Amino acid sequence: TLLKDAPRSMGVAFEPAAYSTLMLHCFKHAELAVNGILLGRETGGVVHVVKAVPLFHGITSLMPMLEAAMLQIDAYCASVELTIVGYYHANERRGDCELGHVARKIGERMQSRFNAAVIALVDNRSLKGASAAGDKLPLIVFSLAGNAWTQVGAASVRLEGAEKALPALAQLLAAGAQHRLDDFDSHLDDVSRPWLEQKLPVV
């Protein structure tokens, strides 16, 4: 699959809980690659990301473990009437904003399930500003157009209720909430950890 930059007419809207979970996952494992699945729905040409489900940190290409996680995610989606709408990925190296082979392959698998699926690639260069007010989120969003992953215009990617969501995320980070976030990796180490249905702490 090729990769190219071009504007797209579709929109992508992140709910505060989904954005915060994604960012907390990145901050918890700031020196490692991380990834996860995006859940939500599409309405009126906009992909609404309602929930982010953290998967792995460090090695993000464990396909057998991904299959095991997807079985549980599928069952969860059916129970809460959500759809898999995409995939998120943060590369290990600061400044590495390339949509690599693993991210593209997993993104294609998500797109085979949901035609409008997106990949949200974390912009590590801007990660420190994840909770700062501004017009641009530290996310580079791609959708599949034909056989090419095409960048969605930054103006079409938004955080719902950003004026409240960003200060709330800053409070979560200051309180160390990232250290209490579990992903599927940590669940495999301790099955009592609620990686799939965990709620963000209230600050």
Image (cartoon, grey):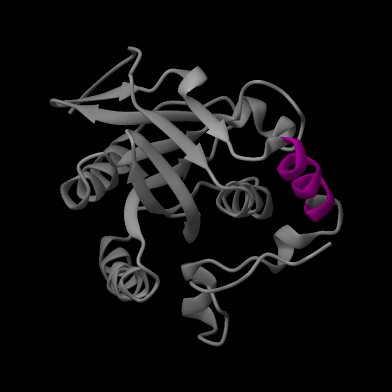
Residue toward you, 162 or 2: 162
View extreme (left): residue: 146
Please tell me which residue is depicted at 42% across the width and 30% down the height of the picture: 141
- Asked if residue 114 lies left or right of residue 168, the reply is left
Q: Quadrant of the N terminus?
A: top left
- Asked if residue 75 lies left or right of residue 171, the reply is left
x and y, in percent, of residue 8 in the image = 33, 18
Give the magenta part as a residue range.
Answer: 163-172
Please tell me which residue is depicted at 41% across the width and 26% down the height of the picture: 98
Q: Quadrant of the C terminus?
A: bottom right
Residue toward you, 141 or 116: 116
- Asked if residue 96 lies left or right of residue 176, the reply is left
Please tell me which residue is depicted at 49% across the width and 38% down the height of the picture: 13
Does residue 20 appear in the picture of this structure? yes
Does residue 91 appear in the picture of this structure? no
View extreme (top): residue: 6
x and y, in percent, of residue 193 in the image = 57, 80
* Magenta segment includes 58: no
